[in-house]
């Protein structure tokens, strides 16, 4: 809802500047937190791509204080909102927010994990979204071209370049995108590719490891 939304047991300021956090994204974050391989280093580096409210990056900073967390977004208003939420939760000095398209200038081979809830809705499906979503949430945080894969198709190879050997990519996807996303990740040379279901049984998450 506009004003405040609970995410992983914490309240985040939410308004027209960014996508309002959803329960599915809480599941995405839990999958990442449960991946012990990501967090076993002294200072694991994790990048939240398309941070919006900052809820993903801030949750990682709070749950894994030893991590180096960076969050990117192309929207200055969204980044301002994310910084406000970081301040609200006392991690304004522990999360680095950067204006960037996808991973921007993140150095190749430097990250332990890339995590994203990217835009994945088909243009043709935008008109069928609930009125409150269409009218109050940024279109650029929702729509992703004719097939809904416009952003993901750029994110997957960009993440592969940014990840260290053994690093992981985790993404939220639409329920009908499992097969094409799996194929894209395998073509990009990701290993251990999985399409995971949400609590309702829908295929909503993709993950893979860089060998």
Image (cartoon, rainbow, N blue to C red):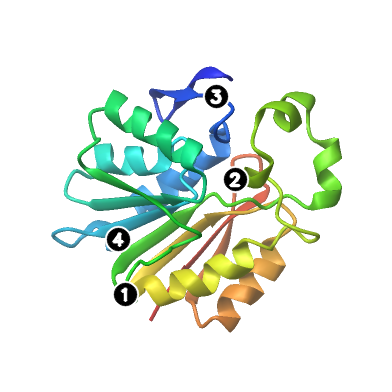
**Which of pointers 1 and 4 indicates the residue nearer the eye?**
1
Q: What SS does tag 3 mark?
A: loop
Residue named by callout 3: 15
Answer few, some or many: residues within 10 Å of disc 2's Cα (few below 14, many 20 plus, some between 14 and 19).
Answer: some
SS for callout 2: loop
> At numbered mark 1, what does the secondary structure look like: helix, strand or loop?
strand
Percent across and percent down for residue 24 are: 56, 40
Image vertical order of residue 58 relative to residue 188, above or below: above
Query: How far apart in space, not on screen, are marks 1 and 2 (Cα)?
Result: 27 Å
Q: Quadrant of the N terminus?
A: top right
Q: CA distance from mark 4 to mark 3?
A: 31 Å
Question: Which label belongs to residue 29?
Answer: none
Disc 1 vs disc 4: Cβ atoms closer than 8 Å?
A: no
**Are discs 3 and 2 less than 8 Å apart at CB?**
no
Mark 4 = which residue?
A: 38
Q: Which residue is mark 2?
A: 198
């Amino acid at each position: 809802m506009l004003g405040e939304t609970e995410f992983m047991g914490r309240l985040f300021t939410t308004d027209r500047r960014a996508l309002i956090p959803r329960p599915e994204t809480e599941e995405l974050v839990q999958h990442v937190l449960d991946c012990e391989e990501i967090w076993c280093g002294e200072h694991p580096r994790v990048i939240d791509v398309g941070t919006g409210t900052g809820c993903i990056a801030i949750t990682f900073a709070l749950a894994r204080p030893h991590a180096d967390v960076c969050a990117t977004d192309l929207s200055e208003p969204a980044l301002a909102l994310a910084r406000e939420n970081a301040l609200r939760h006392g991690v304004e000095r522990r999360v680095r927010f950067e204006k960037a398209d996808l991973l921007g200038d993140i150095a190749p081979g430097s990250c332990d994990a890339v995590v994203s809830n990217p835009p994945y809705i088909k243009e043709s499906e935008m008109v069928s979204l609930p009125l409150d979503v269409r009218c109050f949430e940024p279109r650029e945080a929702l729509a992703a071209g004719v097939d809904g894969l416009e952003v993901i198709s750029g994110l997957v190879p960009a993440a592969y370049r940014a990840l260290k050997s053994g690093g992981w990519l985790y993404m939220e996807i639409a329920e009908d995108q499992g097969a094409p996303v799996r194929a894209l990740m395998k073509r990009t040379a990701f290993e251990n590719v999985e399409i995971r279901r949400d609590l309702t049984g829908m295929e909503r998450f993709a993950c893979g490891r860089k060998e």
